[in-house]
Amino acid sequence: MLKNAESNAELKGLDADSLVIEHTQMNNHAPKIQHRNYKAHGWINPYMSSPCHIQMILTEKEQIVLKPEEEVAQK
């Protein structure tokens, strides 16, 4: 998932090396899909899965720019 986010950032023109994870969230409210797990001797068991939605927000790291000393001294 991080590789996918990195490639999406590069596609949008962002610097992938300066990305920081700002927010992550997982929701268990994804629709459950019924599957069958076929076993030996004709047995069928339900396929137990717990799908979820994962949200991840990445931002570029803010760079701190210092004021030049001349401007600081004049004030």
Image (cartoon, helix red, strand yellow):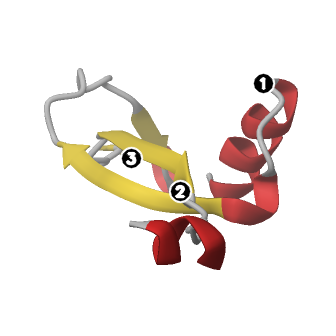
Separation of marks 2 and 3 at Cα, in angstroms: 6 Å
Q: Kindly identify which numbered label has been placed on residue 40.
A: 2
Residue 48 located left or right of residue 66: left
Which sits earlier in the primary sequence, circle 2 or circle 1?
1
Q: Amino acid at mark 1?
A: Lys
Residue at 23 percent across and 21 percent down: it is 31
Q: Amino acid at mark 2?
A: Ala
Which sits earlier in the primary sequence, circle 3 or circle 1?
1
Answer few, some or many: residues within 10 Å of disc 1's Cα (few below 14, many 20 plus, some between 14 and 19).
few
Please tell me which residue lies in front, 13 or 1. Answer: 13
State if disc 1 and disc 2 touch (CB < 8 Å). no
Element type at mark 1: loop
Residue 39 located left or right of residue 3: left
Where does the image place residue 52, in percent across and percent down from the top left?
Answer: 29, 40
Residue at 82 percent across and 41 percent down: it is 7
Element type at mark 2: helix
Please tell me which residue lies in front, 39 or 6. Answer: 6
Q: Report the residue marked by disc 3.
A: 43
Relative to 62, say whether 9 is above or below.
above
Where does the image place residue 47, in percent across and percent down from the top left?
Answer: 35, 44
| Quarter holding residue 53 | top left
Q: Report the residue marked by disc 1.
A: 12
State if disc 1 and disc 3 touch (CB < 8 Å). no
Q: Amino acid at mark 3?
A: Trp
Answer few, some or many: residues within 10 Å of disc 2's Cα (few below 14, many 20 plus, some between 14 and 19).
few
Residue at 62 percent across and 78 percent down: it is 69
State if disc 3 and disc 2 touch (CB < 8 Å). yes
Separation of marks 3 and 1 at Cα, in angstroms: 50 Å
